[in-house]
Amino acid sequence: MGIEDIEIGEDFDFEQMLNESFENTENNSVVDGVIVEITSENVLVDVGQKIEGRLYLSEITVNGEVLFKEGDTIPVMLMGTKGERPSISYKKVLQKEKFDAFVKEHGEDIENVTIEGKIISVKQRGGFIIEDETGLEYFMPMAQSYLKAFGAVGKKVKAKVLKVNAAQNSIIVSRKKLIEEAKVEKDSKVNEILEKNEPVNGTVKKITSYGMFIDLGGIDGLVNYNEISYKGPVNPSNYYNEGDEVSVVVLSYDKTKQHLSLSIKAALSNPWEEIKDELDVGDTITVTVSNFESYGAFVDLGNDIEGLLHISEISWNKNLKNPKDLLTLGEEVNVEVIELNVEQKRLRVSLKNLQEKPFAKFTKEHKVGDVITGKIATLTDFGAFVTIGDVDGLLHNEEASWESNAKCKAIYKKGDEVEVKIIKIDREKENISLSVKEISDSPAKNFQNTYKMGDIVKGAVKDKKDFGIFIKLEDNLDGLIRNEDFGPLVLEEVNIGDELEAVVVNIDTRKNRVRLSVKRLEQQQQREVLKAVNDDSGMTLGDLLKDQIK
């Protein structure tokens, strides 16, 4: 009777099972037999009884090669009978040899030996057959396994020897006992560490993305990536290698789950407490760029403290989108401390505060009236913002073109280069006003080169308003005749498209406006009549007026 012959029910008595397995020792004797016949599946062996014993061919086959031939003598184990035919096994002879070597190696203390092997089969409702690297097999009852049958085959396990029977060549092992003893040992060691309440040394056993497992002399604990550095969550592999020695402090121990939480940073002095009295808001410090994020860069003070250099604090240039455009990893820079909160372990710094303000620099180099080139940065409903170096100026719609109702959105696109004139600098609000119109002469200015005050012009009525009418003079230039400038002419009698004559009474080249008057035209005509009277004494004033009325 061997390991595979042990039958176990769901509610088995372990001692009873063991005693039954140790009975009938006389059936486990080894004898020499002669191979009588080898078939494709079986081997018949003469063991000196009336009928030959039968082996499966697989028992004497290794890597597809049959080890013996007909007529060879081989040792087999007698295990009783099956019907009239003797039950024999060549494999159990090999197991006995391995068993004897195991017993000889471990001597009297064999029932405390820890074995390691691979599960090669599962006995239904019974347990597992484990084979070690020498080929020796062990039996592990289900209740002693802490394993489920499904998926167990092929799994490597460690277990402790429970019982050994030399007569039966059988070894019963328990994974449960090994785990429970390890738990007791771990509880004892952790309690000892907790009682001392001081840092202990360990070895980095395994590094993962979320932390490191530390071996504290046979017990393992986890250092979460939050507990490695005072900088906060870090990548463990950037700081340590497997095999490194570290000093740790026990944070907590879950006895039920056997979860030991450790901390490396708790074993170190707190750098935040050290800088509390050494650093103030407004101080200038030298730091090293240590990491980049989309929202800024982290800088290292060199004592396990990192500060945030937000992208808005890197440059006065509001169009900066990526910190890598101005900084490089490992670069040393001078920054100003703008926030220090020791309790919350928060440090914020600024690079731009140590740089000259772009507006101040701009006003040193430029003045109202300068013509400069910039790029369209943003288009809005009211105009466009033009970037000039590190500052933005506003080009209002009204200053974009001499064409009335022109919109920047219709004229430009983002990124266009544009030549502009500075028309206003507001130092208090730090605003810069720009103009494209003022670089070229206004239509009113061109009009002024041809006409002067008092000249008579003609134009078609373009628009009518409550306060007067507009007549078209030239491209992008209209003339306004206000109601009070009509004289005897009635506004209601004028239609769009009608041609009117009027006198130029004002030309505003800055605002591109021309004021006209019909009333002044009539007055001019009357003056000319009077002049004619003075020149021709033979004609009366009444005669001249009569001719004019006609």
Image: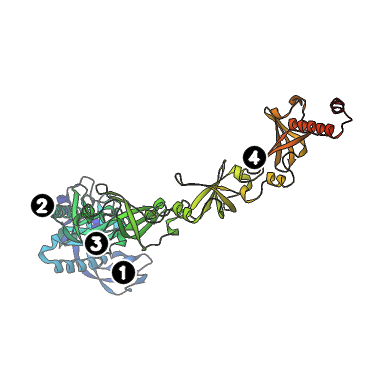
Which mark is nearer the camera, 1 or 4? 4
Look at label 2 and name its amino acid.
Answer: Glu
Real-space CA distance between mark 1 and mark 2, rounded to the nearest whole angstrom: 60 Å
Q: Residues within 10 Å of mark 1 (few under 14, many from 20)?
A: some
Work out whether mark 1 precedes mark 4 in sequence or the reverse, and give the earlier one: 1
Q: Which residue is most to the right?
A: 538
Residue under label 2 = 195
Real-space CA distance between mark 1 and mark 4, rounded to the nearest whole angstrom: 103 Å
Real-space CA distance between mark 3 and mark 1, rounded to the nearest whole angstrom: 47 Å
Which mark is nearer the camera, 2 or 4? 4
**Front one among 144 and 359:** 359
Residue under label 4 = 405
Residue under label 3 = 204
Could you tell me if residue 327 is visible in this image? Answer: yes
Helix or strand or loop: what does disc 2 sit on?
Answer: helix
Residue under label 1 = 60
